[in-house]
Image (cartoon, helix red, strand yellow):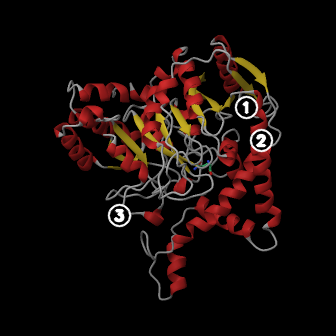
Amino acid sequence: MTLPDAHEIRRAVSTRALSAVELCRASLERISALNPALNAFITVAADRALERAVRLDASADRPALPLLGVPIAVKDNICTRGIRTTAGSRVLDGYEPPYDAAVIERLENAGAIVVGKTNCDEFAMGSSTEHSAFGPSRNPWSPDRTPGGSSGGSAVAVATRMTPLALGSETGGSVRQPAALCGVSGLKPTYGRISRYGLIAFSSSMDQVGPFATNIADLAALLQVLAGPDHRDSTCLTEAPPDYAATLDDGITGLRVGVPRDFLSDGVDPGVRDAFDVSLEVLRAAGASILDIDLPHARYATPTYAIVAMAEASSNLGRYDGVRFGPRGDADTLNGMYLRTRALFGREVKRRLMLGTYVLSGGYYDAYYVRAQRVRALLRQDYDRAFEAVDVIATPTSPTTAFPLGARIEDPLQMYLADIFTTSANLSGLPALSVPCGFADALPVGLQLTGRAWDEAMLLRVGAEYERRTAWHLQLPPTAV
Ligand code: GLN
């Protein structure tokens, strides 16, 4: 059976119309049936999930839990105590974290059930999941194509209803782009909204956990559980989040939607552009006004992102030396051990570690890293200015639909261009949402909405109104009916 959405599951389990165990089994069976062809999961934690379901069915305070009995898939760069956590890398093969990430604690306190760990590009570096040491995930709409990345496995799990919800992570589009390419909703929250404690670090000034769901009400419920202060992550906002469900039905009459026309002028596939133009008409019909805006520095986002992300990665990944985590390369000398261990990194990670080290090195630091930080500040100013005139900014999430597996793997520049519309929000720390907005050649297209810092509520409200007026989010991929 295809799984109901999270709200329906919560209702069914709290009234005992269905048990958490039945739903957990349904999720696990669907994973067994679909995963061999799609490779969404690296690890399925069936026993642990069923044990938790049994305990939930037996416990007394169940009805109050906001995600009671809801199966959820978790990207494999988020630490789960006692469940292998690889980040898609051979460097962490077999690693079992001694603790749960903050988001896992929050999920479990809310009654959700983690059923497994999803496939991703190695250390979240990529846009297709092809850089996973565990083989690529496949797009359920067309299995010879990529689901996007790096949180591709999570997007596939939700698109095929193996689980109604999933967690991904974002450094530069890794939730929104796969959400768009798989036809589900995905959110990159404001930097600091969700604790990063237990999220395996890639680029610490941008990394953020993000939720996937099949509809906006579920996405809001999941964000509500994940968001909030955590003293273990000093970048985490100390204020509690607002009630996201409370404003979902407020409509968008009088709202101002900005479109950065210049930035969108080239490189967007005609089918994507058509779907995007139609989605603007939907927003207009709902009472919003559509205004042109300028983001003059947005076209520098991709190279700026690359420099910042690679520099921070080269520092963060220094810890994988065989001493504390994962497998250890055998050698007679300390240096030999480092070399053997670090030889386990895949090609893309090695490329980025070398480039990152280069841009931080003496003589180049000012030319690359310092300059990138300056562009980053200018980009944020572009947004601040734009948000004086508009309430949200709309673009396509990705310039293309899902590309064929293998098409860009030898061409890093082409791969990085998959992120041209997404990385600006990461560099600026702003929240951004992708919602399904149509199809081009039978492949899903995503509409991206970017908002003011801390204003996820506005994005969810616009997304909910858009969803009420369209049926794209209800379409199921042919491999999953
Ligand atoms: N695709 C981008 C990259 O390759 C972003 C990855 C991410 O958001 N984790 O770095």
Count every numbered label the image shows and give the total. 3
The nearer-to-camera label among 3 and 1 is 3
Which secondary structure, mark 1?
Answer: loop
Kindly give the residue lying farthest to the left in the view shown: 58
Residue matched to label 2: 298
Is residue 78 in view? yes
At label 2, which amino acid type do we have?
A: Ala
Q: Residue at x 73, y 33 (%)?
A: 387
* Disc number placed over residue 98 in the picture, else none: 3
At label 1, which amino acid type do we have?
A: Val
Residue matched to label 1: 268
Query: Above or below — where is 15 with respect to 433?
Result: above
Please indicate whether residue 88 sits to the left or right of residue 99 in the image: right
Task: Give the Cα separation between the discs numbered 2 and 3.
Answer: 41 Å
Q: Residue at x 24, y 45 (%)?
A: 52
Residue 135 rendering spot, x and y as whole percentages: 47, 51
